[in-house]
Structure formats: structure tokens, C-alpha cells
Image (cartoon, rainbow, N blue to C red):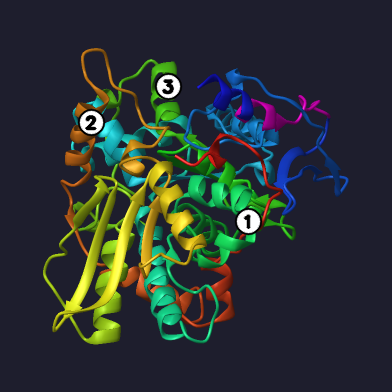
């Protein structure tokens, strides 16, 4: 045990403390080679951050090791950063400097909402309205639901899989397609398995980053402002989402801004409510914003397939219909090694047409990777998530109170999460309209740039994640 810890610590590095200087400095870009640059927005120059050693106190305990120049991003992406922007907005309004006021947008993940609803004994809709009221009371302008962006992510994943399947004899390493919504898994693949695994990973952006594109590009134009004047905050169940938001791929050199400026964990939002000395139950409810919310009348809607977004569920159903003209009312999940490794097949006349799987947690991910390297992977699509049980069990979620086990709390959160009605992503008329109005069609270059991304091999580390379980 100590051997594994020492290996991980010896490979972790982070920048030294950054000196605050006058001017608009502070934006940090992650380069494709793994280095970090601090951007001086006024001078238009970039400075490479120095490195210093990290201790166990810096560890996220999130199932994936950080190369920890990244740890400074974790520090910057906190509730303190949001409070700083809100305070600056208030000051600028007081002195009439309106051109320096940010529009503050909050995008909340359904997993975070379910975790907070469980703690405070609220329904999903009640929690959504209370959270909207809470953030607007602080001075935020708009509160959205990332389920809306997940519709885009699911649709693009479906289309990408069918395209890969049809081209499987023409392209190398096109199948199995591995889901890309989990940044912990993507980070691990980039740092540990490099170019060998990366071609298998779906290029579709996660819901968080699609929300970033939607807010900074489309919503900014709706407001008649520019992307850098919007401060976009997401609330996520996972600390690795902070690292995902910091990627160079999601930074605009033109506007010198990230698609997502700040990521708060579920626990950090709960800490904010405690700092404000107000329980979420006592916050005045505010109706959800009309833009970018998954509403069916007064009710929120979500997706089938579990607490990680239902990527397998929607990909396999879409592919079965698109490729083989088959539809079915229910998927039969077969548990294999453990509850976090399950298989689903599509069969016709005794022949298996599609074979897909869920692989949650690094023990199962290691098995998938090893089978890929040996050419023995039998699956067409794999929904991969770094956290055991998936996103509802993310490291940023609220921890169990005294007297409640982690398993009991997770069961409660799962029940709350699954209490809303579900629908397919193609049933969202607003998303269908935005493919034309915002993106110029599903096959346009703008659509590809807004909804897809690339991955980059990072210098291989020798750390605990290389150990074969």
C-alpha cells in the first residue's frame, strides 16, 4: 500500500504559488504537452508556470492521479473565485462601470442536483428551484440544467458510433468506441496509454463542455455580448471536471476565455450555503430559466440508462434501429465480473449483432485496456466511467452523514435522480432547432467544432495507475 502511494506522490508536480500582479492576469491554459501557461490578458503574453513538488495534502482522492501543475487550477476553480467575480460585479455596478460587469451563468448537473436534493429532503424540481433561487440571491444572472447539453452529447455519440460501425473495415482502431464523458478516464488514457487507446475514444464532448460551447457562443450572441464577458460556472459531481474545463482545447485564443471559467463540486455548493448560513430548504424558490432547461411542463426530464448519462442505453438503441431496423422495449443487462461491469447484446436469429458494455471504476477499466492491447476486446461500444457505480458516486458529491453508510446514501441519491420522467434526446425540440439555428446543420464544420474535441498523448508516468490489478 505504501509502495503504491509513494510512487504516485513521486510523480505528482504542481506550479509554485502565483504572484498576483496588477492587470487582468490569472487565466491558465493547459498545453498539449502537459505544461501550463498563465495568460496576461492586458499585455497579451503567456508565462510558463514553474513546477514544485506535491504532498499527499494536495491529493484529490478521486481515483485518478493529477500531474499537479493542475492543482493550482483546483485552487482557482472554487467558490472563492465565484465570490470574487460577484463582488467585483457589485463594485463595478456601484461605480457605474457597467462594461466591466460579467454576466454570471450557472449550469447545474442533474447528479449534483440529486445529491443536494437528497441531503435536504427535496424533490428534484424543488431542488432545482431552490438552487436557482440560491444562486440568483448571490447575484448570478442565469441558472441552467446541463441535461440540455447532454441531449447534444448523446445525439452526437449515437451518430458517431453508427459512422464508426459502418466504416469499421476502412478505418483502423474505430471500434470499440469508448465513451468520452468522463474526464477522469480521458485523463488516465492520455497520461498512461497514449496514442494506442486514444483513437478508440469518442470525440464527442462531455455535456459540461457542450454547455460551455452553447453558453459562450450561442447564448452570448443572444445577449448581444461577447464570450469573455460571460463568467460560466458549472456544478459537477466530479473534481476531474475542473481539469477538463482547463484543457487548451476549450480555451478561445480570440476572446482569451475558457468555455467553462469555474467548476464547483456539489460539496462546494453545499459549503457555500453553509457559508451564507442558510439551508437550501429555506431558500425562496425561483422558477427555472426558460433557456436551455429540460422541462416538460412544470416537470424536469432526464435520460434512461443510469446516473452517468445513459450513453450505452441510447447508443445501442439508436444503432440497433439505424443499422438493423430493430427496436426493443427493454435492455437486458448481464452482470459479468462485478456490478460495475455489465454487458448488453442485440441479437437476431441467434446471431449477436451488437455487443456493448458498461465498465465503471479503474479495476474494470484496466481489464478493458488490456483486452484492447491484446486484440481480444469483443465489444462494439463501452460506456467508461472512472468512479465505481458511476457519476452519482463522484468524488465531489456530498458525503454520508453520521449513521448513514456510503451505500445507503448512494441508494437514496439514485432514487431521487431516477424519480423524474425520461425521454430520448431527439425528443427535445429546442435541441433539434439549435442544430439549424446555431450550428448550421448536423454535418456542418461549426457543429463539429462546437460538439467534438481531440485528445493528446501526455508523457507517460510511472504511477499507481499503471499497476495491473
Residue 223, given in percent of the width and then of the height, sits at 53, 59
Between disc 3 and disc 1, whose residue precedes? 1
SS state under label 1: helix
Q: For the point 60% across and 43% down, which residue is it?
A: 102
Label at residue 118: 2
SS state under label 3: helix
Disc number lying in front (3 or 1): 1
Determine contact: label 2, label 1, CB under 8 Å.
Answer: no
Residue 297, given in percent of the width and then of the height, sits at 18, 58
Q: For the point 21% across and 13% down, which residue is it?
A: 403
Q: For the point 24% across and 45% down, which residue is it?
A: 339
In this picture, residue 296 sits left or right of residue 40: left
Task: Report how far apart the C-alphas of labels 2 and 3 lie in the structure.
Answer: 15 Å
Residue 236, given in percent of the width and then of the height, sits at 43, 40
**The residue stretch that appears in magenta:** 8-21
Residue under pointer 1: 194
Q: Residue furthest left?
A: 329
Q: Quadrant of the C terminus?
A: top left
Q: Is residue 104 magenta?
A: no
Q: Nearer the viewer, residue 200 or 466?
A: 466
Q: Is residue 140 above or below residue 120?
A: below
Residue under pointer 3: 271
Q: Nearer the viewer, residue 305 or 370?
A: 370
In this picture, residue 219 sits left or right of residue 94: left
Task: Report how far apart the C-alphas of labels 2 and 1 lie in the structure.
Answer: 39 Å
Circle 2 crowding by C-alpha within 10 Å: few under 14, some 14–19, many from 20 = many
Between disc 2 and disc 1, whose residue precedes? 2
In which image quadrant can residue 343 be found?
bottom left
Task: Report how far apart the C-alphas of labels 3 and 1 lie in the structure.
Answer: 37 Å
Between disc 2 and disc 3, whose residue precedes? 2
Disc number lying in front (2 or 1): 1
SS state under label 2: helix
Amino acid at each position: 500500500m505504501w509502495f503504491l502511494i509513494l510512487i504516485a506522490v513521486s510523480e505528482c508536480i504542481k506550479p509554485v504559488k502565483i504572484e498576483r500582479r496588477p492587470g487582468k492576469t490569472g487565466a491558465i491554459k493547459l498545453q498539449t504537452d502537459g505544461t501550463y501557461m498563465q495568460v496576461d490578458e492586458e499585455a497579451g503574453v503567456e508565462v510558463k508556470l514553474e513546477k514544485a513538488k506535491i504532498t499527499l495534502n494536495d491529493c484529490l482522492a478521486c481515483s485518478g492521479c493529477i500531474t499537479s501543475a493542475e492543482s493550482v487550477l483546483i485552487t482557482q476553480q472554487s467558490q472563492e473565485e465565484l465570490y470574487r467575480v460577484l463582488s467585483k460585479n457589485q463594485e463595478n455596478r456601484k461605480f457605474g462601470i457597467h462594461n466591466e460587469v460579467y454576466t454570471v451563468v450557472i449550469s447545474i448537473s442533474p447528479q449534483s442536483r440529486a445529491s443536494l436534493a437528497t441531503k435536504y429532503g427535496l424533490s428534484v424540481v424543488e431542488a432545482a428551484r431552490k438552487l436557482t433561487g440560491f444562486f440568483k440571491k448571490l447575484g448570478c444572472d442565469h441558472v441552467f440544467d446541463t441535461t440540455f447539453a447532454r441531449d447534444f452529447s448523446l445525439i452526437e455519440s449515437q451518430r458517431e458510433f453508427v459512422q464508426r460501425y459502418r466504416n469499421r473495415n476502412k478505418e483502423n482502431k474505430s471500434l470499440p468506441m469508448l465513451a468520452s464523458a468522463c474526464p477522469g478516464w480521458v485523463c488516465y488514457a492520455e497520461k498512461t496509454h497514449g496514442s494506442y487507446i486514444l483513437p478508440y475514444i469518442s470525440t464527442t464532448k462531455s455535456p459540461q463542455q457542450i454547455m460551455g460551447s452553447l453558453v459562450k457562443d450561442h447564448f452570448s450572441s443572444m445577449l448581444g455580448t461577447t464570450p469573455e464577458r460571460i463568467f460560466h460556472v458549472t456544478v459537477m459531481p466530479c473534481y476531474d471536471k475542473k481539469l477538463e474545463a482547463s484543457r487548451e482545447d476549450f480555451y478561445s485564443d480570440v476572446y482569451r476565455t475558457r468555455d467553462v471559467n469555474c467548476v464547483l463540486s456539489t460539496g462546494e455548493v453545499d459549503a457555500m450555503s453553509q457559508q451564507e448560513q442558510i439551508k437550501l430548504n429555506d431558500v425562496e424558490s425561483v422558477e427555472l430559466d426558460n433557456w436551455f432547461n429540460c422541462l416538460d411542463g412544470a416537470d424536469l426530464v432526464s435520460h434512461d440508462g443510469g446516473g452517468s448519462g445513459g450513453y450505452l442505453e441510447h447508443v445501442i438503441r439508436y444503432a440497433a434501429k439505424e443499422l438493423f431496423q430493430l427496436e426493443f422495449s427493454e435492455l437486458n443487462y448481464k452482470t459479468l465480473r462485478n456490478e460495475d461491469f455489465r454487458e448488453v447484446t442485440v441479437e437476431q436469429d441467434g446471431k449477436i449483432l451488437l455487443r456493448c458494455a458498461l465498465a465503471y471504476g479503474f479495476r474494470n477499466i484496466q481489464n478493458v485496456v488490456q483486452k484492447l492491447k491484446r486484440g481480444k476486446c469483443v465489444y462494439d461500444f463501452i460506456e467508461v466511467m472512472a468512479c465505481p457505480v458511476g457519476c452519482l458516486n463522484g468524488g465531489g458529491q456530498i458525503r454520508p452523514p453520521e449513521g448513514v453508510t456510503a451505500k445507503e446514501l448512494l441508494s437514496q441519491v439514485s432514487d431521487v435522480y431516477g424519480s423524474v420522467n425520461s425521454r430520448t434526446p431527439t425528443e427535445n425540440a429546442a435541441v433539434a432547432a439549435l442544430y439549424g439555428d446555431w450550428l448550421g446543420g448536423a454535418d456542418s464544420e461549426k457543429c463539429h467544432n462546437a460538439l467534438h474535441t481531440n485528445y493528446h498523448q501526455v508523457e507517460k508516468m510511472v504511477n499507481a495507475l499503471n499497476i495491473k490489478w
